[in-house]
Image (spheres, rainbow, N blue to C red):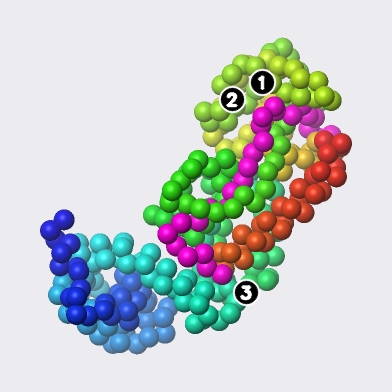
């Protein structure tokens, strides 16, 4: 840790914010020329700001080369630690009204792949129309991402564990049905399992008010609900899936429901780093999701008898 002492600015100065912004822009863009095009600042100004920051910190952040530059060890450390701080400052400025009074900037979120088969794309499109100054990026993946260290502003998670670094709001709850193609049968029932879940050979369900245990035999185990959905439609077996994925298929008879999983409710939460101020653009998306899924839940409740 001794080497980090050189990165601490002198106590009789505040760190030069322009220098910090210029350094991050150059490091993130991979060069002064690219940073100049992205920021609209002259390369000479960017170079001067970075040099002034290095003088203030009394440390070399960039090593200039004939082909460009490389980050020093201290420069890499500075980039890792300073980028989140600068993001927080930008969010704070937005909230205090020093920027335009409408959402703007970049917004990157991670969602489960089951959203691929829902209407999430339509939600994203609606958000883009409402807030054209926000550059929204949605990444669908089932792995547990680290929003703080991987550069996500927020994540949408099903059944999230308690996490002191994250806070947020439940956006909707869904029921889980045991579904299959009409021609699937057998005792025990061929079953498609999800990851490390559903290892029991008997699944408790309720159908028409009657509780029963469905005996199953595992035929395949997949890590993604989206893959499981495809496998169910292909007729390899039955699976437990949320209504948001298979509700329309059950209504049309493409799939049949063998019953609802007892204690199988899934809660979906919109989560963001607790140490960061909730920006206008992030809050706007969270509120839009809450409103969208409230409409979905109302429609699902109205059509409950069909499912």
N-terminal of the pair, mark 2 or mark 1, is 2
Q: Residue at x 63, y 42 (%)?
A: 267
N-terminal of the pair, mark 3 or mark 2, is 3
Q: Which residues are magenta?
A: 253-280
Can I make out residue 32 in this image?
Answer: no
N-terminal of the pair, mark 1 or mark 3, is 3
181 in relation to 247, above or below: above
Q: Residue at x 20, y 64 (%)?
A: 74
What residue sits right under mark 3 in the picture? 132
Which residue is at the front of the view, 100 or 216? Answer: 100
Looking at this rendering, what residue extends furthest in the left direction? Answer: 2
142 in relation to 134, above or below: above
Residue 222 among those drawn in magenta: no
What residue sits right under mark 2 in the picture? 198
Q: Residue at x 41, y 81 (%)?
A: 39
233 in relation to 208, above or below: below
What residue sits right under mark 1 in the picture? 203
Can I make out residue 154 in this image?
Answer: yes
Q: Residue 158's x, y, as percent? A: 58, 43
| Mark 1, secondary structure of its residue | strand
């Amino acid at each position: 840790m001794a080497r980090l002492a050189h990165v601490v600015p002198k106590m009789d100065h505040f760190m030069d914010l322009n220098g910090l912004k210029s350094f991050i822009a150059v490091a993130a863009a991979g060069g002064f020329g690219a940073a100049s095009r992205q920021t609209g600042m002259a390369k000479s100004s960017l170079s001067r700001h970075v040099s002034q920051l290095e003088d203030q910190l009394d440390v070399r952040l960039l090593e200039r080369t004939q082909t460009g530059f490389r980050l020093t060890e201290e420069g890499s450390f500075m980039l890792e630690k300073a980028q989140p701080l600068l993001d927080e400052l930008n969010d704070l400025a937005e909230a205090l009204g020093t920027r335009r009074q409408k959402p703007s900037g970049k917004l990157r979120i991670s969602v489960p792949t089951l959203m691929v088969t829902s209407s999430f794309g339509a939600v994203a499109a609606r958000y883009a129309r409402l807030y054209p100054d926000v550059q929204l990026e949605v990444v669908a993946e089932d792995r547990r991402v680290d929003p703080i260290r991987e550069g996500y502003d927020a994540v949408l998670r099903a059944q999230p564990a308690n996490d002191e670094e994250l806070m947020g709001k439940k956006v909707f709850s869904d029921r889980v049905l045991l579904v299959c193609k009409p021609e699937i049968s057998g005792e025990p029932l061929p079953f498609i399992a999800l990851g490390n879940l559903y290892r029991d050979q008997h699944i408790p369900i309720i159908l028409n008010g009657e509780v029963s245990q469905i005996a199953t035999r595992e035929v395949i185990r997949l890590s993604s609900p989206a893959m499981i959905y495809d496998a169910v439609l292909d007729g390899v077996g039955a699976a437990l899936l949320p209504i948001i994925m298979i509700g329309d298929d059950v209504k049309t008879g493409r799939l049949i429901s063998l019953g609802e999983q007892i204690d199988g409710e899934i809660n979906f939460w919109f989560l963001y780093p607790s140490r960061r101020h909730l920006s206008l653009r992030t809050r706007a998306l969270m509120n839009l999701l809450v409103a969208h899924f409230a409409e979905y839940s109302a429609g699902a409740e109205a059509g409950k008898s069909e499912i």
